[in-house]
Image: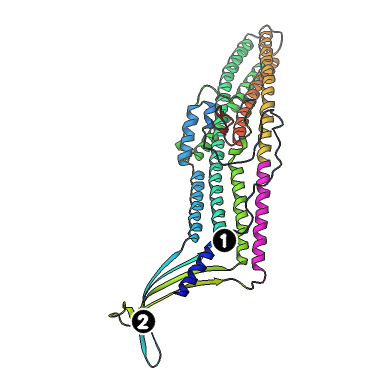
Amino acid sequence: MKQIVKFSAFSIAAMLLSGCVLGPNYQRPETPLPLEFRHTPGWKVAQPADLQASVAWWSLYQDAPLLDLLKQLESSNQNLRAAEAAWREARALVGGSRSGLYPKATGQVGTSRSGNDVSVGKNNELALGLSWQLDIWGQVRRQVESSEASAQASAAEWAGVRLSQQAELVQNYLQLRVIDEQMRLLDATLVAYQRSLQLTENRYKAGMVTRTDVSQALTQLKNTQAQRLDLDWQRARYEHALALLVGSTPNALQVASVETLPRLPALPMQVPSALLERRPDIAAAERRVIAANAEIGVAKSAYFPDLTLSASGGYRGSNLADWISMPNRFWSIGPQFAMTLFDAGLRRSKTEQAEARYDQQVARYRQTTLQAIAEVEDALVQLNVLEQEILVQREALAASQDSLQLTENQYAAGMVDYLAVSSAQTTALNSERTLLNLLATQLTASVQLISALGGGWQVDSDDEKSPQL
């Protein structure tokens, strides 16, 4: 009885000691963040926080076929499936870590024969055991903390893969739409060049121009036809890329042409400071820091003894007939301390490794944050410059079209040769194709900005701390 009382008192003391947790408590590493984005006043950055809910940022482009493709991506993209499976694996590891906080029960039933040169004996055994390694120094709790942070990092990486695949799909889709516009432009240009060729041939037959003018008009027509044919394989390439993103074979997906480019989202002048909080890569990097920080406590707990409470009991006998009977009953109960007395520096080495891994994750977290700020700055600069460049290019296009009209009138009046017409037509075509390329770059830059911000920039006016679309 006295032994039982002593054991209970010891157990209570051990339970009280279990409140101790070794290792540093997590504190978010400081990062050198600017107060606001340099190239857009009012755009401010913030420390990363929990992941926001997924938002349909692609609705900003107001394109129904794009929405259908993104639905297919969500259900069939293989990279997304792999990321989701990795998250489920990490989540399962959390349950494995938590199991160390609870007692373990074992059962055993067996029979054996043993003997020597003189005799042979038989032994039957039925036993139940219960053991509990108390988490006095917080080793298991730190392991749980680390695995939970790793699971959260895996969830953030899953969200990051989703955002990356969505952004890639939207960019490919926008490029395909721009190629459709270029096809329409070249088709219309070919019609105009065909008329010019016919006009030149008629003037040649009438003796008003030389054969050189006809050759120049034909050369220009054929070069443009070659450019138009080149767009066919470019469009097919983007269509195949879209098929890959939605988990389909290239021949199973066809994207119909539409008449206009998707709508460019309007860039607001002021937004709340929580924009970068929903970037999955920043959230994942911070969770990796939390996990590495907890691993330091796991390593340091190896310096201290482990306390295991165990109890077992059962029946052991040689005859099956009276195997389970009071005389054959046995039991044992008691605590056990165990620790490594000498390991030639192994525990110190593991602690240093854990601290070094923590420093690595902190550096990666800070680099990820700096990279995020740089990506936002790049996209902001690009969009601001492109807006001005497009305005200038529209003016250049209007001037080239006016020049073409004047040159064609002069050619009809016999004032200039066809070389002047060809030059003016080429200039007008190049001006319009340059404008289309700028519009394509602008659309792509808008996707890059949305991706850099973790999925858009619109917020609910009732809650500026919860960015959403």
Asked if residue 229 shows in the view, the reply is: no
Q: Position of residue 422 (x, y in %)?
A: 67, 18
Q: Residues within 10 Å of mark 1 (few under 14, many from 20)?
A: many
- Residue visible at 67% across and 19% down? 391
Tell me the magenta residue range.
343-370
- Measure how far apart labels 2 and 1 are at the Cα level: 40 Å
Q: Contact (CB < 8 A) between labels 2 and 1?
A: no
Instruction: Between residue 53 and residue 233, name the one nearer to us.
Output: 53
The answer to whether residue 63 is magenta is no
In the image, farthest residue toward the left: 321
Q: Position of residue 96 (x, y in %)?
A: 49, 58
Instruction: Between residue 73 and residue 112, name the one nearer to us.
Output: 112
The answer to whether residue 367 is magenta is yes
Q: Main secondary structure of the magenta part?
A: helix
> Which of the labelled discs sits on residue 290, or is there none?
none
- Residue visible at 46% across and 41% down? 76
Camera-nearest label, 2 or 1: 1
User: Residue 294, relative to residue 391: is it above or below?
Assistant: below
Q: Secondary structure at mark 2?
A: strand
What is the three-letter code of the residue carrying label 2? Answer: Asn
- Residue visible at 59% across and 58% down? 21
Q: Position of residue 259 (x, y in %)?
A: 52, 21
The residue labelled by disc 1 is 139
The residue labelled by disc 2 is 123
Q: Position of residue 101 (x, y in %)?
A: 50, 60
Q: Is residue 44 left or right of residue 242?
A: right
Instruction: Between residue 26 and residue 172, name the one nearer to us.
Output: 26
What is the three-letter code of the residue carrying label 1? Answer: Gln
Q: Quadrant of residue 428?
A: top right
